[in-house]
Amino acid sequence: MTYMIVMQLIFTVIGLAILGYYIGIKTDPDGNRYIVYTAIGLAVGVLVGFMTLYQWMKSEARYERRIRH
């Protein structure tokens, strides 16, 4: 299960960075805004990925406590 969560984190980060790059190229093809949009996509991807990982760890901890008692 951990492998799946880590892979989801990696693909979310990569996907949002690519989406940011695409939006940057489409909105300002001659400028450097694609770098900013890529960085924003990367940051959002990392944030969402770690939030998902944290929620999964919390649910696993609740499951472990429930099983032991």
Image (tube, helix red, strand yellow):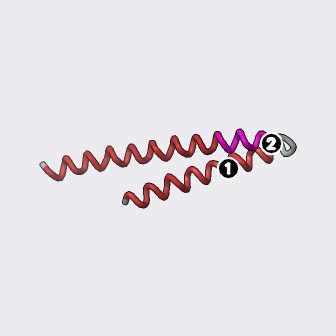
Q: Magenta region: which residues?
A: 32-39
Q: Residue drawn at (49%, 56%), measured in percent from left and top?
A: 8
Q: Residue furthest left?
A: 69
Q: Residue drawn at (25%, 50%), measured in percent from left and top?
A: 63
Q: Is residue 68 above or below residue 37?
A: below
The answer to if 37 sits in the magenta stretch is yes
**Residue corresponding to mark 1:** 19
**Residue corresponding to mark 2:** 27
Badge 2 density bin: few <14, some 14–19, many ≥20, Cα 10 Å: few
At mark 2, the secondary structure is helix
Inspect the image, locate mark 1, and give the three-letter code of the amino acid beneath it: Leu
Q: Residue 52: which numbered mark, if any?
A: none
Rendering coords of residue 61 (x, y %): 27, 46
Inspect the image, locate mark 2, and give the three-letter code of the amino acid beneath it: Thr
12 left or right of 5 in image: right
Q: Residue drawn at (65%, 41%), measured in percent from left and top?
A: 39
Q: Residue furthest right?
A: 30
Q: Quadrant of residue 42?
A: top right
At mark 1, the secondary structure is helix
Overall secondary structure of the magenta section? helix
The answer to if 20 sits in the magenta stretch is no
36 left or right of 65 in image: right
Rendering coords of residue 22 (x, y %): 74, 50
